[in-house]
Amino acid sequence: MIWLDTLVQGVLLGGLYALFAAGLSLVFGIMRLVNLAHGDLIVAAAFLILVLVTWLGLNPFLAALVAAPVMFAAGWVLQRHVLNRTLGPDILPPLLVTFGLSVVLQNAMLQGFSADSRRIPAGALETASLDLGPVSVGVLPLLTFASAVVVIVVLNHVFYRTALGRAFRATSDDLTTARLMGIRPAGVFATATGLAMVVVTIAALYLGMRANFDPSIGPARLIYAFEAVIIGGLGSLWGTLAGGIIIGVAQTAGAAVNPEWQILAGHLAFLIVLLLRPRGLFPRAFD
Amino acid sequence: MEAARVTVATRAGRIAGLAALALVAAGLALPSVAGRAVIQDLFFILTMLTLAQFWNLLAGFGGLVSVGQQAFVGIGAYAMFAGVILLGWDPVAAILLGGLAALVLAVPSAWFAFRLQGAYFAIATWVIAEVTRLAVAQWKALGGGTGTSLPREATADMLLVAAIGDLFGVRDAAARDILAYWLALALAVATTGGIYALLRTRHGLALAAVRDNTEAAKSVGVDAVRLKWLVYLIAAFGTGIAGALIYVQKARISPDAAFSVTDWTAYVIFIVVIGGIGTIEGPILGVLVFAVLQALFADYGSWYLMALGLIGVLTMLFAPRGLWGLISRRTGLHLFPVRRRLDTGPTTPRGD
């Protein structure tokens, strides 16, 4: 029974990692940009929600609803005025600019919020659980997983069923032709990063309510997100969810054996998949 | 009419070579006049220069942007500690062990990371560094997660320390710093000179070709994969040696410090970017700027790192060739010329 419990907890944790990864995957899919500050942006959003909760006394979900447009605007401005300048055939500028941004963000948060561990207070939700026969699962992890599924359904809908999604796919496939059809890539990219920041806000909400966070944990979140994307295969959001689940299950299984092996087990699962299926489990994009 | 020749050398390059020789000679003699604090500062600068040159070789010349070089600093340092504590080696001899350990780690790392392209390669190197850090933290014989120190008897009997102490009339601790400084000087000179020499060979030309256009380079017979391996392994070995040397001087190690992404990769990236990526001069200029900033502002902690990151971002956005790029474009100066130029000789009017 304990193994079933570990498995369920791992799958639910995978939902959180899929949320971390969805924004990264979206931005990469559209503009081939890997944002090394992605993890730090998640932590920044968590601090934003925390501030709204503690200063204005808002409910965490309401606070995330307020934070989402702020993060969208931040992402839009970041992409429009900074990251767009770095896009091109050379991979160095986007990598080095976002790496620098990661260091700036981490230290800005360290300055603003100190190195103390924080948590977004979620009241009764923190401990609420559901009894599902052989296992009992926390309501919060369940909600996290459900949100990941909803985010992926919505993103897929936007991507394949709306005019905005057509613009995303067109700029991703062929920038020059998309331009000829009257699409402005600068604006499309900015909207995409804004959208990714909304997903980041949702991820931050659950990250902050689930466990303690501090300004230094961003890079590790980036790494989990990246592992989920690679395991799933570039370009497939459902694959990303599968990747998140694999990392989550490996981590909880590792922790069940020895608490010190939790993180290591997740990384090893990633390396094994990379070894056996270098293009991931459900590859869609070719690059 | 004189036949066209391809030349690399410049007059500034020859003068710079002579100046560098004089500077190295002065550097060797420096401990006779400089105090211990200066020697320690220079040790730091020289080791950072070494790390920067190797990262620049990877990213600037090889097009392999790694954010996981701390893996090789850490494994090099830990292998040196293992050599001293577990095998009873002299710390100086154990530095080589550090380089070898980094080389051994680099083979599976490259094998994994080369499966991914561009940005994903970068994060893969980071994952490998994390895995190495977590694995080393399980190594109980070397202190596990909390780390350990070099045993006093090992540092006391270090090769040459007594001789240096007698030569300069200083205590053992100061003599150890002088020894570490000399080794760092030798390493920085060998690194800079070695990379310079490598870039002036056929391999250097091939490297530039692969970086600028992989497909075109392949089509004229350049083995891009072999070159990537070559560069990655060289950088790993050198970074491992530098890591081991840094920790000979520190004499105290922990996984978090030895595998620190800030200390061994972020600083190094900023040095190279600010100085000028893809040139030999860039890291040298960058490390000097970095040393000044470090001396003036390091006490400001996170404000300092924030500013450093911001300078790096602004440099990349508005002067992607760094400070040296600005200087070189304005003056046409190349102190370590690696570019091939077509020298057609004096143009003579052709009569028929």
Image: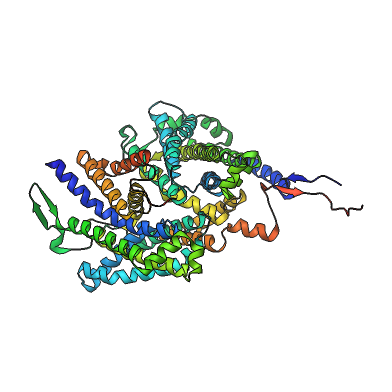
Is B61 rendered above or below residue A45? above
Image position of B50 (left or right of A52): right
Image quadrant in which you'd find residue B108:
top left
Observer able to see residue B192: no
Residue B274 location (% of width, % of height): 55, 57
Is A253 rendered above or below residue A237? above
From the viewer's side, name the closer residue of B137 and A211. A211
Residue B1 location (% of width, % of height): 87, 47
Observer able to see residue A178: yes
Residue A63 location (% of width, % of height): 24, 70
From the viewer's side, name the closer residue of B17 and A130. A130
The residue located at (17%, 48%) in the rendering is A8
Give the colour scheme shown: rainbow
Image quarter in which the N terminus of chain A is found: top left
The residue located at (43%, 45%) in the rendering is B116
Image quadrant in which you'd find residue A252:
top left
Image position of B269 (left or right of B333): left
Q: Residue furthest bottom?
A: A56
Q: Residue furthest right?
A: B352
